Amino acid sequence: MEKAKKLIFEIGNLLEDAPQQKSRDKSGTLVIFEPDEEIFENYQFKPEFLEDLMWNYAYLNAGLKIHFNGKEFYSQNGLLDLLTNKTNEEDLCYPIIHLKGDDIALALTHANQYGEEYYSFVNGQNTTQGGTHLSAFKEAYVKVIRDHFGQNYDPSDVRGSIVAAISIKVQEPIFESQTKTKLGSQYVGPEGQTIRSFVGNFMAELDNYLHRNPATAEELKKKIKQNEKERKEIAGIQKLANQKAKKANLHNRKLRDCRIHYTDTNKDERYNSTIFITEGDSASGSITKARDVQSQAVFSLRGKPLNCFGLTKKIVYQNEEFNLLQHALNIEEGIEHLRYNRVVIATDADVDGMHIRLLLLTFFLQFFPDLVKQGHLYILETPLFRVRNKKQTLYCYDERERQAAIRKLGPQPEITRFKGLGEISPDEFGQFIGKDMRLEPILLKKDTHIKDVLTYYMGKNTMERQQFIVEHLRVESDEAEPEPVEVKGLE
Amino acid sequence: MSVTYTEDNIKTLDWREHIRKRPGMYIGKLGNGLSPDDGIYVLTKEIMDNAIDEHMMGFGKVIEVSVSEKQVRIRDYGRGIPLGKVIDCVSKINTGGKYDSEAFQKSVGLNGVGTKAVNALSRYFSVQSFRDGESKKADF
């Protein structure tokens, strides 16, 4: 069992075939694995990324207990629990509707938020990109609502602000890729009906439910009316804004596009498609020169974006910068056709940069929460220091790394503090957005409620925030850097 | 210079080589774990799917999972892989117990590739099956 021996063998080769043994352990299977560094360079598991997965298993297998890193993941009510955990009770327009049938389950409600939020599953598999079952649900849902109220509502008004989860089971499902994130099956089984009619038939249950719960039906109707009103209010400006954006897309000074997009489903590289949102001309300049034109696009902001906390969607059209941004990302009608897998906020690591970060986070959380929830939003980490001697250059992302670098490079290395992205030369920038790029994903924990967080940080001054500032205020001193050499552009 | 096209140009890839040359076909993107859809999470999911399938069939109410920076350990309390087939199940492509069983047709892991992909893309892979007081272990 010596470790060295294992490493010599080719990966996937049998190393040790232990003979069958008596055992007092309970029946079952134990698998232990360590991914290969040759394939997954410098990988590191972030267990929090697996929490959503574990929760989904729990929701879809009510009664199952998963012990994950010391925490228990358990759900008694399946999809109802899922929606309860994904929403904030006081934001709901009506109590969550939960319907179950053979091989299908459904939960839905409307919340006070923009966009449409869906969770879809096939045979326990989370189809993050939807597929035939989700399309069937969306279609049947609109039809049931229209028929129930006897009104020819616009589909976008019926679905606006919906939060829904659907899970179905089909025989021999066909997915559009090996990673199984999008269902392609047309039928529920080799001899079964179409998925469209299977889901459609089941949705009659929703009509029954609304008849039995008139209070819920009333609230739902109110929400649809409200959506309709808001849509009509912005219809005029929307048309104008879209025309402007189309014109601008041909010569969009703010966007430096790349060649491969997230929507190119036949290409593996689509997962690398990235857009950097930068501030100021100099930073945009460096990043534009340094980027990989295949997969990396740049969108440059002029100054600080507007604080859109508490504003309605109208502002996304009225504000030129926001309007161009939503068109660059192609998310005006939802994130289904998002053009970049990674939307990366790349601002300076100073107070202004932090402020811009917050403003952009507010914009996305407020108007495109699904983009954040699906894990597309990131912050670019750039080094604060460069430590080098004649032989070697090290980039350090925090004080601890700087100390380590000084120890490693020995006596009196040259230490440079980067003041802003604009001061990093394109050559160096290439390394920071290349394969060693450090991205901090924006994660929403199960108990983070967007509205509370935004009110706290971005709303009108509150007592709580004032108190926080008073308690945490400190005067920054630069004693960490003995003799900083400032970088001025290219060397 | 002319391009020659002879028998030497035709290659048959061993299953491991194939997975390692084209990991994207099996697990989507690679990545280093900083993104939630990176390959190492897909590997974890492949193993979890098998444990979940056992639960869905009515075997095992608990699954234990521990994930550290580099390693994943998953123990289910299902029926255990039949001891004589442990090695085949994790290293012979298109081997699986789900091909003709009706109940398994509504599961996701029925293509018999998942576990092998994890094996081929792992530096270390160990499987141990426990069944009725007997156990069988294999290390890769």
Image (spheres, coloured by chain):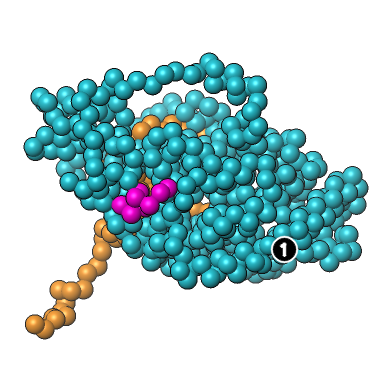
Chain colours: A cyan, B orange
Amino acid on which disc 1 is placed: Ala
Asked if A86 appears above or below A406 in the picture, the reply is below
Q: Which residue is drawn at 30% across and 34% down?
A: A384
Q: Mark 1 points at which residue?
A: A235
**Magenta span contains residue A394:** no
Residue at the extreme top: A471
Would you say A172 lies left or right of A81 here? left
- Residue B86, image x and y in percent? 37, 45
- Residue A454, image x and y in percent? 61, 35
Would you say A389 lies left or right of A370 here? left
What secondary structure predominates along the stretch shown in magenta?
Answer: helix
- Residue B137, image x and y in percent? 34, 37
Q: Which residue is drawn at 40% across and 49% down?
A: A280
How many neighbours does mark 1 have within 10 angstroms: few (below 14), some (14-19), or many (20 or more)?
A: some
Of A327 and A77, which appears nearest the observer? A327
Of A173 and B110, which appears nearest the observer? A173
Whether residue A71 appears in this view of the structure is yes
Q: Which residue is drawn at 90% across and 52% down?
A: A211
Q: What stretch is highlighted in magenta?
A: A279-287
SS for callout 1: helix
